[in-house]
Image: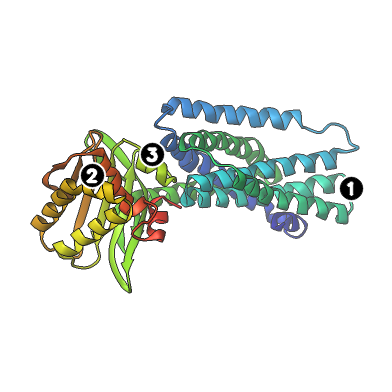
Amino acid sequence: MAGGLCAFWLHDRLHWILGFSAGAVIGVAFFDLLPEAIDFAARTHAAHSVVSWSALGFLCYLVLDRALKFHGPEDRGKLGASILCIHSFLDGTAIGLAFQASHAVGIVVAVAVVTHDFSDGVNTMSIVSRNRTERGPALRWLVADAVAPVAGIIATLFFGLPPDAIGICLAIFAGFFLYIGASDLIPESFHAHPKFVTTAMTVVGAALIYLAMSLAARAATVAGVDLADTVKLGASTLVLNGAGKREKFVFDVYVAGLYLQTHEADAAQVLGDAGPKRITMTLLRNLSAEQLSDALREGIGQNSTPAEVVALQPQVDALIAIMTAIGTAHKGDVITIDFLTDGSTVVGIGGEARGKPIPGAAFQHALLAVWLGQKPVQADLKEALLGR
């Protein structure tokens, strides 16, 4: 809506906005969507395969754009505006699927789509105005173009995709964005005002997206605690899936981080995955060995049947022994719990493993369920660890 109205009022400065939009949209494709797509699909698709899906998205959007191109002067305005509405619906679908990946990806894609849709509004008004459409019908087309992305977002509320499929969708949408930026926004902005400032605005748009992505990739910060974006666990590189703060009554207890091989927003999938995982707990206050042990033992009990608790008692005793040996953990200490592929669990503090590995995949499941089970230690912390 804003773009279409600006087409009426700020015609002399639109080339700046279009140039910036071009750089931002291309920047999102290269610096956010493609890396995220490769990350999400890493378990089932090689990087070159993901990039090929992006190329397919580029070509499909090209074919769609060319196939729907309007011909002849009579209905050019209506058909052109219809094409933009279809494009905007796909933009909304991209936002919805990006939010299925994670809030962070969703927000970045939403910003890119809003930036792009501003220029869509400009183009809608330009098309209908060139064809002498009256202002009333022109504004109705503009409203349709503005509603289309919302409809696309709503459509994604009725279906979900597994992480590898989300990765492929992000790759395809990266191809869409590359086509939109390279074949639509850049030529349109430069045609409107073929000056150096237009090119400079495109470079600035891409550079700002790169800067934002670079800063975001360094670390996540929760309650003043910086969590690394990736960690090494044996031969595996794990990515930060989500992080949140554990609170009890009015006290801050620790900041927890969940590291997985690929992003996953489904707790059942995380609990059922035999791959390597890590939970980190950065303490926000001093905790005794008894406090640590009681919290973990209570969490295991709440998410296990009485028979399971009895069967897991040797492993629980081993965990309590490790916590007792650690003694009092101080504010700022980082406790790690590593879930290894051989079914064993390793507890560490300050980067140093403590005690012997605790065997048993069932124990891994029960311990991870403390945060991700049906009765998690804190509901909003579970959501945060799942990146929701």
Residue visible at 38% across and 52% down in the picture: 385
- Mark 3 crowdedness (10 Å alpha carbons): few <14, some 14-19, many ≥20: some
Task: List the residue tagged with mark 3.
Answer: 262
Q: Is residue 85 left or right of residue 227?
A: right
Task: List the residue tagged with mark 2.
Answer: 338
Q: Give how far apart the Cα atoms at labels 2 and 3 are.
A: 16 Å
- Mark 1 crowdedness (10 Å alpha carbons): few <14, some 14-19, many ≥20: few
Residue 223 picture quarter = bottom left
Please give the label number shown on residue 322. Answer: none
Please give the label number shown on residue 132. Answer: 1
Residue 282 on image: x %, y %: 25, 58
Residue visible at 32% across and 45% down in the picture: 259
Residue visible at 33% across and 52% down in the picture: 303
Residue 294 on image: x %, y %: 21, 61
Q: Amino acid at mark 1?
A: Arg
- Mark 2 crowdedness (10 Å alpha carbons): few <14, some 14-19, many ≥20: many
Query: Quick one: SS at disc 1?
Result: loop
Q: Give how far apart the Cα atoms at labels 3 and 1 are.
A: 52 Å
Residue 104 on image: x %, y %: 46, 51
Which label lies toward us, 3 or 1? 3
Residue 8 on image: x %, y %: 78, 57
